[in-house]
Amino acid sequence: MLNTPHAMILGTGRCVPEKVLTNSDLEKIVDTSDHWIIARTGIRERRIVEPGTSLSDLASAAAVNALDDAGVKAEEIDLIILGTVTGDMKFPATACMIQDKLGARNAVAFDVSAACSGFLFSLRIASAMMAAAGYRRALVIGAEILTSMVNWQDRDTCVLFGDGAGAVVLGPSVDNRGIIHCCLGSDGSCAKLLYNPGCGSINPPTPENAAAQLHTIHMAGKEVFRHAVTAMTNAMQQVLQEAGIAPDQLHLLIPHQANLRIIEAVAKRFDIPAEKVYVNVDRLGNTSSASIPIAIDEARRSGKIAPGNLVGMVTFGAGLTWASSVIRF
Ligand code: UT7
């Protein structure tokens, strides 16, 4: 059965860096090829920040766009949740930096660590806090500078990731529009399939650990791929079933943009035709927690989502974590 939404999306925004890193650029850095990258991932290029750009800069720019779009002032925001694993610093939370940059002095601000599922986890938390704790205007952001933890000598991973930020402003639901249902899941037994072992308290950033590249992304790609298809398919199935929605009722599916083959496998399982599946992995690569909110903003601004449309979202990432949601825009 369709749930009654508590929170709806009032506005969206995004910010991606101007600098483009193409597959041909990568051919000059590691032993790879444009042909291999496109065939195995669907990625043609990604955006990367210039040195000196902080995550809070990118995220604040996306947030300003979302606030403008929503017609909401920064002081009206009472909650800021940022999904990220590449914050400005280990502490304080980057959401606090964003609060300061925006002048959102009435907000409580914190970060959520759920890797590529960070945005949908944050959206779920925000909608629950609005339903149960009286928050009225929330800013939910997914933002990453993954290139800050890429090992540019590791061709298994360095071709996959890009930088960017996306944001939504939530307000109280009207006309049954908003977040209808969300499903979240985790499996810590597979944590070491995709992880960054350095910089934490187990492996502090010593010169030895830095030389061993412990501060970079380590991934067992094939296994992660297998888990991604299964977890995203199951999460999609669960959210549709629990909300009482058939796949063909979805106007658009926005899957996490990690690999075109994963996206196609999930869409095929639900018989969703390609024209109803949002894809930007070819232009942006995998931007982790930023991938879904960037896609939402692109889809809204290009007219692919209109008010009243039902949109499905599904993601998967390190943790392992996964999440799905159905939203009526
Ligand atoms: O964001 C959420 C989590 N992340 C993901 O969902 C990513 C999931 N994994 C994947 O997308 C895929 O596993 C990859 C794109 C990472 C790799 O594709 P694959 O089809 O699983 O390739 P593979 O790792 O099995 O490698 C096949 C071959 C290997 O060579 P041999 O052993 O067959 O001779 C690799 O060494 O391709 C080689 N290879 C490359 N060749 C050219 C691996 N990376 C590259 C590369 N360029 N960049």
Image (cartoon, grey):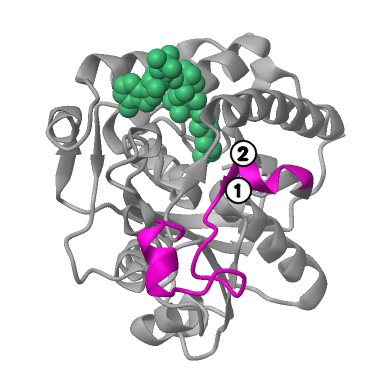
Q: Earlier in the sequence, mark 2 or mark 1?
A: 1
Q: Nearer the viewer, residue 239 or 200?
A: 200
Tag 2's secondary structure? strand
Q: Is residue 204 magenta?
A: yes
Q: Are the residues flagged by discs 2 and 1 in contact, CB closer than 8 Å? A: yes
Mark 2 CB lies closer than 8 A to ligand 1 = yes
Q: Is residue 112 above or below residue 291?
A: below
Q: Is residue 232 magenta?
A: no
Where does the image place residue 95, in percent across and percent down from the top left?
49, 76
Q: Magenta residues?
A: 189-214
- The kind of residue tagged 1 is Ser
Q: Is residue 250 above or below residue 89?
A: above
Tag 1's secondary structure? helix
- The kind of residue tagged 2 is Phe
Residue 303 in the figure: left or right of residue 31: right
Residue located 34% across and 83% down the image: 101
Residue located 51% across and 83% down the image: 91
Q: Which residue is mark 1?
A: 117
Q: Which residue is mark 2?
A: 316
- Residue that protrudes farthest toward the bottom in the picture: 105
Q: Quadrant of residue 170?
A: bottom right
Where does the image place residue 111, in percent across and percent down from the top left?
57, 71
